[in-house]
Image (cartoon, grey):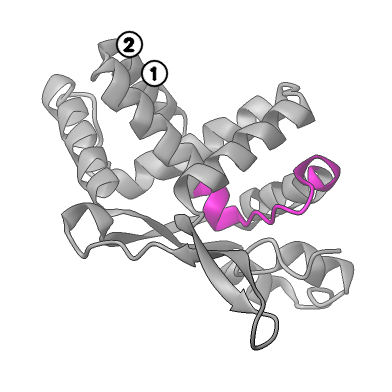
């Protein structure tokens, strides 16, 4: 088994028996976990704009506490709901692999260099170098802190473990999964616009949690 699917490593700990015999009070006060999710700064700003649009359009229906961290949580919760309704493992794996490659893999460039074999013979070798991003607003990173139930974290870890045969050599963590679901949502918002239908769907979901 992969060592850890999240910063909390819940699945590995439970299988190893680390959580057994903790007692009622310890379980009660630790059944919610805090996560730090990294997202590009522009997408962080874009998400806040979307949240403010919902508040402006439905200000009488939106709870005061609604913010970007709650939106990100709702998208993760909706993702888990789709899994429960029978999403195909291969399709889910393809979605995560595509998101990992798009949002988390560093950009590289190929470069050909001459490698000496001896004093008189050289050969060309292709190497890859990471492309350093300029430190502008679009390359900065925002760190979002989320709080969720332990059962929701464990459900995500079990999902990633089940997807192992479909993920190949791609490693995915819960933190990355959450970020991918959010970034894919924001990408759709940017491409399709701030649809009132989507906003109403988010508001409806918000009322159920």
Residue 146 point in image, percent of width and height: 43, 57
Residue lying at the far left of the rendered structure: 56
Quadrant location of the N terminus in the rendered image: bottom right
Q: Residue at x 31, y 25 (%)?
A: 189
Residue at which label 1 appears: 201
- The answer to whether residue 67 of the structure is visible from this angle is no
User: Does 143 lie within the magenta span?
Assistant: no
Q: Are marks 1 and 2 in contact (CB under 8 Å)?
A: yes
Q: Residue at x 49, y 38 (%)?
A: 181
Q: Is residue 102 above or below residue 54?
A: below
Q: How many C-alpha atoms fall within 10 Å of the one at disc 1: few (<14), some, or many (≥20)?
A: few
Q: Residue at x 82, y 44 (%)?
A: 162
Residue 62 point in image, percent of width and height: 24, 30
Q: Give the total of numbered labels.
A: 2
Location of residue 198 (image quadrant): top left
Report whether 31 appears left or right of 145.
right
Q: Is residue 63 above or below residue 10?
A: above
Q: Label 1's element?
A: helix
Which disc number belongs to residue 20?
none
- The answer to whether residue 125 of the structure is visible from this angle is yes
Which disc number belongs to residue 197?
2
- Front residue of this view, candidates 123 and 88: 123
Residue 163 point in image, percent of width and height: 79, 42
Q: Residue at x 46, y 56 (%)?
A: 109
User: What's the magenta region?
Assistant: 163-178
């Amino acid at each position: 088994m992969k060592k850890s699917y999240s910063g909390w490593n819940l699945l590995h700990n439970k299988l190893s028996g680390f959580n057994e015999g903790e007692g009622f009070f310890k379980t009660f006060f630790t059944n919610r976990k805090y996560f730090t999710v990294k997202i590009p700064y522009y997408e962080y700003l874009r998400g806040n704009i979307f949240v403010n649009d919902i508040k402006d359009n439905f200000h009488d229906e939106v709870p005061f506490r609604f913010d970007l961290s709650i939106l990100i949580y709702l998208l993760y919760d909706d993702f888990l709901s789709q899994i429960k309704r029978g999403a195909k493992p291969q399709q889910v794996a393809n979605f995560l692999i595509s998101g990992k490659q798009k949002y988390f893999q560093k950009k590289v460039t190929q470069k050909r260099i001459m490698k000496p074999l001896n004093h008189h013979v050289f050969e060309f070798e292709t190497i890859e170098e990471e492309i350093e991003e300029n430190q502008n607003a679009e390359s900065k990173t925002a760190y979002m802190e989320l709080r969720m139930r332990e059962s929701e974290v464990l459900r995500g870890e079990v999902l990633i473990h089940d997807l192992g045969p479909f993920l190949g050599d791609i490693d995915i963590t819960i933190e990355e999964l959450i970020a991918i679901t959010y970034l894919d949502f924001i990408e759709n918002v940017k491409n399709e616009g701030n649809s009132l239908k989507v906003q109403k769907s988010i508001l409806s979901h918000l009322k159920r949690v």
